[in-house]
Image: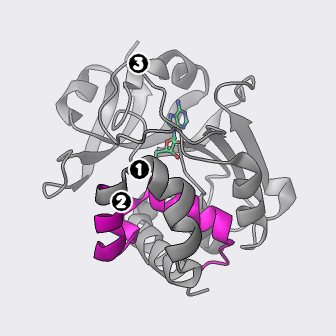
Amino acid sequence: MITFNLPKGAARLIVLQRIELINPFLIKLRKFFGRYIFSNFITKYFLNSNLIAKKYHDVMLKEFSTIEKFIKIEDKSFLSIGGGMGGLELIINQTFKNNDYYFIERNYVSEKVKYGWGGMINEEGYNNLDLQKTFLKINEMNESQIKIFDYDNDNLPEKKFDVIISLLSLDYHYDFNIYVEYLKKVSKINTKIIFDTIRAEYFKKIFKNVEIIRSDEDTVHKSKRIICSQFLS
Ligand SMILES: C[S@@+](CC[C@H](N)C(=O)[O-])C[C@H]1O[C@@H](n2cnc3c(N)ncnc32)[C@H](O)[C@@H]1O
């Protein structure tokens, strides 16, 4: 697969989740009209879904290359926190077949999307869970592999995961502590927890094992991607 099948509605959400996917002309329109008009009207008429699909696929392939070597054939159950449409999990699914994918996401689009650090205030969402499920299914993930949970309304899955991934979400936009007790419940000693953070050193007090797997010095957040395992308490 060299691109994704991407319905227009999903493309409109993906450009909110991954703002780097839109071209400079659309970035200018967004700045000029503001995010509300941008996400409700402009993306409806000016977005080329095929182009977004290809760019999203390329970006997700690149993200996959940062974590690929840590994923083993024995890893069967994956949890994605704030995974957006789930393009990364689709790429994982192409390489490692027959795994289970659990997604915790939000089922609304904030009127104002700020992309900042909210700390313990975690109100921003930009997803639609029906569209996410459709997107996963039309890109070769079987219905039986997919379990999607609405962070605001569902009981979160209580099972032990092999791999937990949160790119540009947990501890990037909102504090890790919002999820810490939940993550302790759903982790085994060797569960791999991968996420982006601006305070990698802090996690040496939380986990026995912390490894920096990517540094992003060019972005506003100057974040690091870390892989952690074994909570210390
Ligand atoms: C910047 S996007 C990143 C999406 C995706 N991980 C990616 O790399 O393309 C952040 C995502 O986190 C989701 N989100 C915000 N708060 C959340 C929470 N408490 N639990 C799960 N997802 C959340 C948003 O809806 C949004 O899709």
Residue located at (57% from left, 84% from top): 50
Mark 3: amino acid = Asn
Residue 80: % across, % down: 57, 45
CA distance separating discs 1 and 2? 6 Å
> For this view, does 154 lie left or right of residue 221?
right
Label 2 or label 3, whichever comes before in sequence order: 2
Quarter in which the C terminus is drawn: top left
Q: Is residue 207 above or below residue 168?
A: above
Looking at the image, do the residues carrying marks 1 and 2 touch, with CB atoms under 8 Å apart? yes
Please, what is the three-letter code of the amino acid marked with disc 2?
Arg
Q: Mark 2: give few (<14), some (14-19) or many (20+) Cα within 10 Å.
A: some
**Residue 168: assigned label:** none
Above-or-below relation of 42 to 199: below
- Which of label 1 and label 3 is nearer to you? 1
Mark number, residue 177: 3
Magenta stretch: residue 66 in it? Answer: no
In the image, residue 187 sits, relative to residue 164, either above or below, namely above
Figure disc tally: 3
Could you tell me if residue 72 is visible in this image? no
Query: 74 or 134: which is nearer to us?
Result: 134
Q: In the rendering, at what x and y percent does residue 89 appear? A: 59, 60
Q: Is residue 121 visible?
A: yes
The residue singled out by tag 2 in the image is 30
Magenta segment main secondary structure: helix
Residue 227 found in image quarter: top left
Cβ of mark 1 under 8 Å from ligand 1: the answer is no
Q: Which residue is mark 1?
A: 35
Q: Residue at x 37, y 70 (%)?
A: 26
Q: Which residues are magenta?
A: 4-31
Residue depicted at x 79% and y 55%: 145
Colour style of the rendered protein structure: one colour
